Amino acid sequence: MTKLLPRGCELCLKGAKLVLFITGLCDHWCYYCPLGETRKGRDVVYADEILVEKDLDIILEGRAIDAEGTGITGGDPLIRLNRTLKYIQMLKDFFGEGHHIHLYTNGMYASRDTLARLKEAGLDEIRFHVTESNREKIRNAKILGLCTGAEVPAIPGEERQLRDLVLYLRQIGADFLNINQLEFTPQNAYQLKERGFELEGSVAAKGSEEVAQSVIQWAESEGIDLPIHYCSSSVKDKLQLRMRLLRRLKNVIRPYEEITDDGLIGKFLVTPKTVSPSELRRMLMLELGIPPHMSGVSFDGQSLVIHRKFLESVLKIYPHSREVYVKEYPTGIRERVAEIPLRY
Ligand code: SF4
């Protein structure tokens, strides 16, 4: 990394950035596109992991992570320009002018008029997934006064193209270049392998990091003062995501759940055999005086969720049940990562 990080990256590393996926539509068709099948080519909106059905879903997810900013991505958000403009204005109205918004686009539809409308709506920063044909768009965004940069993967064998890009960005006075590690995903693995790329570790493409580091060292040795930042797949997964989930955790945990040592949500599920979970919950309140906020009913309606300190008492008055301890990610969809049977 050299020099100042863009504000969008600063917030992302703190886990303070809401990721707003505007649409899975994109006319670029990069062979290394990492989008999964639930998103690629589909006109859907996600706020972090939550499928957005109404605008309020976006606000609630922003609140859940105490968002200080939003990164708008896709697909190409500019294919759905009106939607993008509406959400920029909505986020600024709700979270305030200081809520930093950056947008990532391949630039195909970034006309001067579009860029001006984005700026007027409140966009703070724009990042181009740049190609030879859209370089002019970066200059236009910069002239308009947006914080402007490029964001590209480090492709093994394409160091020269990356150096050319650095020189162009410096020439037009761009604000930054972000270089991402090229990653294998289930969707692009075939395409990457076809082109001779190899996997290194769990997701990284072999040689990608070396290309990025080499370009950064070259830029430094040439005295190029363009801020260049390298974002590895491990930083994305282990740092950004983990930080965001930790922020979310403290806001979404319920009084009868607990935080595990590994930063997950832990809880005890009691599945009664002869009564419904709601009936059992009522029994606990009436017979044992367990306060209502110390228990709940699971999302699937099949089990009672009970605070650790009341588990033994429950089993004494109601022994006909199955008990498990589960661990979940604190995301909107609460993916279950472990289920430990305690009693059948
Ligand atoms: S521009 Fe982005 S979303 Fe579009 S195909 Fe390329 S990587 Fe995928």
Image (tube, helix red, strand yellow):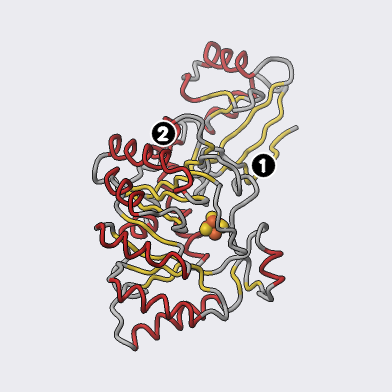
- Picture layout, residue 106 above or below residue 1: above
Closer to us: 168 or 333: 168
* Residue highlighted by disc 2: 60
Quadrant housing the N terminus: bottom left
Apparent side of residue 315 relative to residue 102 in the rendered image (left or right): right
- Please tell me whether mark 1 sits on a helix, a strand or a loop: strand
Q: Position of residue 25 (x, y in %)?
A: 55, 47
Residue furthest to the top in view is: 286
Mark 1 or 2, closer to the camera: 2
Q: How many marks?
A: 2
* Residue highlighted by disc 1: 339
Closer to us: 121 or 189: 121
- Is the CB of mark 2 within 8 Å of ligand 1? no
What amino acid does circle 2 point to? Leu
Q: What residue lies at 69% left-to-right and 37% top-to-bottom?
A: 342
Quadrant housing the C terminus: top right
Write down which quadrant ligand 1 falls in. Answer: bottom right
What amino acid does circle 1 point to? Glu
Q: Position of residue 293 (x, y in %)?
A: 46, 23
Apparent side of residue 213 relative to residue 170 in the rendered image (left or right): right
Apparent side of residue 144 relative to residue 71 in the rendered image (left or right): left
Q: Position of residue 16 (x, y in %)?
A: 37, 50
Q: What residue lies at 36% left-to-right and 73% top-to-bottom?
A: 228
- Label 2 environment density (alpha carbons within 10 Å; few <14, some 14–19, many ≥20): few
